[in-house]
Image (cartoon, helix red, strand yellow):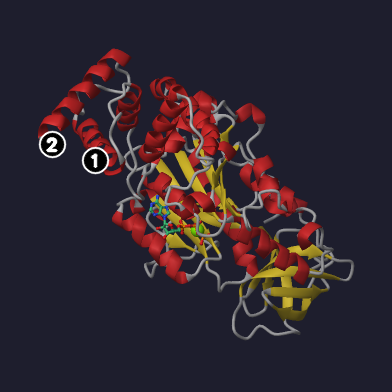
Amino acid sequence: MLDDPGRQRSPWLADYRAQLRINEIGKLVSIGDGIARIEGLPSAAMDEILRFEDGSEALVFDLGSRSIGAILLNQKERLAAGASAQLTGRRLDIGVGDAFLGRVVDPLGHPLDGASAPQFSRRRALEVASPPITARDFVERPLLSGNKMLDTMIPIGKGQRQLIIGDVGTGKSSLALDTLIAQKGRDVLCVYVLISQKRSAVVATLETLRQASVLDITCIVVAEAATTPGLKFLAPFAGCALAEEWMWAGRDVLVVYDDLTTHARAYRELSLLLRRPPGREAYPGDIFYLHSRLLERSTCLSTVHGGGSMTALPIVETEQGEISAYIPTNLISITDGQIYLDPALYARGFLPAIDITRSVSRIGGKAQVPAIKAEAARMKLDYLQFLELEVFTRFGSRLEASVEAKIRRGRLLRELLKQDRLSPLTAEQHMAWLVAYSEGLFDGLEGGAVQARLAGLLKKAAADGPGVGIASGREAWRDAVAGWSRELDEESR
Ligand SMILES: Nc1ncnc2c1ncn2[C@@H]1O[C@H](COP(=O)(O)OP(=O)(O)OP(=O)(O)O)[C@@H](O)[C@H]1O
Ligand SMILES: [Mg+2]
């Protein structure tokens, strides 16, 4: 039949040549601390997935001349030295898409919340090149954090990478969570990556998000403290891949990496276990590259590419306020600005403990809401002058009347800038307190009275939906705020 001239021979059959196919079979020589060493796989490539005979899988992470090192991704109970291993030719990827919203998953996409596995139709590689410059656009749209200090003085734009830096327990995670919660109803999706945190902290975060009803716009990626360093290392890349899918689909995404200090430690542990040469502070030499290739993937895409954005809030912990340590300096130079949380301010009860003099947003100013930007300029100057002048008050010296007035206004500002957790402000509410401050409507009030007036104003600004809007002129705002203030005076009488 094959010789029938009227029939076309199948091209596959025509090209078929009998050949030898070489399949490398490796042998597991040692296993421990989540790391496997395998011999006999000379054509293994970095980041390729290996499969052991019992179904366990590992990620090639170190290529030696005689053996290779791999991070165990899932380990079946019977895996032991001597097991055979084969290359799969696959790269590490994770399921992505809307099915992950409201879910808690590990860095491989497996559910940790006890529900069934998310159903997805697309997968994304954990490691991909960052979007090319030609696909990017300027950061021009604001990402409101709802925080008084951030939105007025250290604004964040969509697609920006803003570092949250501070000592242990200074409110870093709280600030990131507050920013995430402020995205409710703003058409922003969120990814919260928790690296090496205790289960109690993970549960508390989950509960906070649930109570603020933002779980349905959030995906939580968790590598707990008790997991292998390999999974901790992969966690931010998994979170980034999930966010990237939405960004390329034209959505705005906010990703929080909590925190990259523990991530760096996990990477250091992996590298030392694989006997790579240690560098500064015993971290491997390519740790800068590791974090920069992660954060470079956050950007704002041009409209041709859908106009999506990925804003990143990496968190880094300092020791005794030492921001010039290796990992913090790396991250400061990779990101577009930093928010510094000061333990001294925290101890004095100024919360959130943002030290404005050491915080900066290098690109967010362009993206700030114009009305807030114009109104906040004067306030920022007042506050910075006050911080300089305040030093003189310590000597108990007699001050000029003008200096005293500035200090009084500064103290008032400090009171106004305090903000409780889980109380994000809208753009209109920011305008209300800023205008009230510039118009002197808080003057003469002290401590509790300032807070009461502020709370009253914010409430009225939230309720007055159809009245003044963020686009209203300065005069309209001045009249509205003065009106609210009079109402508050009457109510308190
Ligand atoms: N604005 C705030 N108002 C009141 N309490 C706050 C505020 N911000 C943070 N806190 C409190 O400060 C404590 C430490 O906060 P948080 O856990 O966010 O700090 P952290 O820097 O992330 O700590 P760690 O270094 O342990 O991760 C928490 O008990 C939190 O409730
Ligand atoms: Mg924290």
Position in image of residue 482 (x %, y %)? 22, 22
Label 1 sits on residue: 452
Describe residue 8's horizontal placement relative to residue 360 as left or right: right
Which of the labelled discs sits on residue 197, or is there none? none
Which quadrant holds residue 72? bottom right
Q: Nearer the viewer, residue 390 or 104?
A: 390
Label 2 sits on residue: 492
Q: Do the residues labelled 2 and 1 touch (CB within 8 Å)?
A: yes
Residue drawn at point x = 16 percent, y = 26 percent: 486
Describe residue 77's horizontal placement relative to residue 485 as left or right: right
Describe residue 413's horizontal placement relative to residue 327 as left or right: left
Describe residue 182's horizontal placement relative to residue 467 as left or right: right
457 lies above or below 343: above
Q: Which of marks 2 and 1 is nearer the N terminus?
A: 1
Position in image of residue 267 (x %, y %)? 69, 62
Q: Residues within 10 Å of mark 1 (few under 14, many from 20)?
A: few
